[in-house]
């Protein structure tokens, strides 16, 4: 097994144990045993247990970013906040480590949550700046409303999405039955709060050339024009995540 494959395997095992046992019970010895490698082999890759488990978080985040990039490249409309957050919401359900991070689950993360906030402070700042630029580009192309401050829009986007993520733990007994339905509710909420509707026609007037089909076509054209810069932003952020993961690895 090559070094990179071995490291990925160790990360997968560590992630499974973190979710199953919680931070306090997970040990390097048990990770090594489950991964069928020597304890020293784990330490060849990561200096500490914390460094290893932080890399687990980064790998999970990277998987979500990569899937989002693939969707944006395939369909420019995926740059719309409602579509992006809907996909994020669904993807996060398949990443229990990130769910624990979003819901501040101390049983799973223990003190690792505080460590992650300190270690990833600059990365989170970069993420905020990329999201703000994402909204600015959408505003420039008429895809989101421009009647309020972009910082207010960013806050609304983050507060709403975080609320939906947290509700998965806090309101599980009152939530609609299926995950897809809850994702649709999130998308509609974001769309209503931020985006320019197809019915608005992206500023088109009345007449034979201003029906829903024409408005949809104009929206797709606008999204195609905006997509390259937004995709470049997220490609850059994905590389920053990869750099942070490499930083956690022992040289």
Image (cartoon, grey):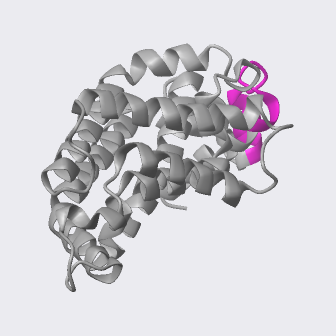
Q: Quadrant of residue 194?
A: top left
Furthest-bottom residue in this view = 208
Residue 160 lies, in percent from the top left, at 51, 34
Seen at 81% across and 30% down, the residue is: 21
Vertical placement of residue 217 versus 203, above or below: below
**Was residue 109 drawn as part of the magenta stretch in this picture?**
no
Residue depicted at 34% across the width and 77% down the height? 212
Q: Is residue 25 magenta?
A: yes
User: In the rendered structure, which segment of residues is drawn in magenta?
Assistant: 18-34
State the residue at coordinates (68%, 42%): 96
201 lies above or below 89: below
Q: Nearer the viewer, residue 35 or 211?
A: 211
Name the magenta segment's main secondary structure.
helix
Whether residue 185 sits left or right of residue 122 in the image: it is right
Percent position (x, y) of residue 86?
A: 53, 54
Q: Quadrant of the C terminus?
A: top left
Q: Nearer the viewer, residue 82 or 43?
A: 82
Q: Residue at x 54, y 32 (%)?
A: 162
Q: Position of residue 53 (x, y in %)?
A: 58, 31
Q: On the rendered structure, is 14 left or right of 242?
A: right
Given residues 220 and 231, the one toward you in this image is 220
The answer to which of 57 and 224 lies nearer the viewer is 224
Note whether residue 238 is visible. Answer: yes
Q: Quadrant of the N terminus?
A: bottom right
């Amino acid at each position: 097994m090559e070094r990179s494959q071995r490291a990925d395997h160790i990360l997968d095992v560590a992630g499974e144990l973190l979710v199953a046992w919680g931070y306090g019970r997970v040990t390097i010895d048990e990770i090594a045993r489950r991964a069928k490698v020597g304890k020293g082999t784990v330490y060849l890759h990561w200096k500490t247990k914390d460094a290893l488990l932080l890399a687990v978080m980064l790998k999970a985040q990277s998987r979500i970013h990569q899937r989002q990039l693939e969707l944006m490249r395939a369909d420019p409309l995926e740059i719309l906040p409602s579509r992006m957050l809907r996909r994020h919401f669904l993807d996060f359900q398949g990443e229990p480590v990130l769910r624990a991070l979003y819901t501040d689950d101390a049983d799973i993360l223990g003190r690792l949550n505080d460590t992650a906030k300190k270690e990833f402070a600059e990365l989170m700042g970069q993420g905020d700046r990329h999201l703000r630029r994402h909204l600015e580009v959408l505003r420039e192309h008429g895809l989101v409303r421009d009647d309020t401050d972009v910082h207010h829009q960013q806050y609304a986007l983050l507060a709403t999405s975080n609320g939906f993520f947290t509700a998965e733990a806090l309101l599980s007994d009152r939530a609609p039955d299926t995950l897809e339905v809850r994702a649709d509710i999130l998308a509609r909420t974001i769309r209503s709060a931020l985006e320019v509707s197809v019915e608005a026609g992206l500023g088109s007037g009345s007449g034979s050339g201003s029906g829903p089909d024409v408005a949809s076509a104009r929206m797709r054209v606008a999204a195609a024009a905006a997509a390259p810069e937004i995709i470049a932003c997220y490609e850059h952020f994905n590389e920053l995540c990869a750099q942070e993961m490499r930083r956690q690895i022992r040289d």
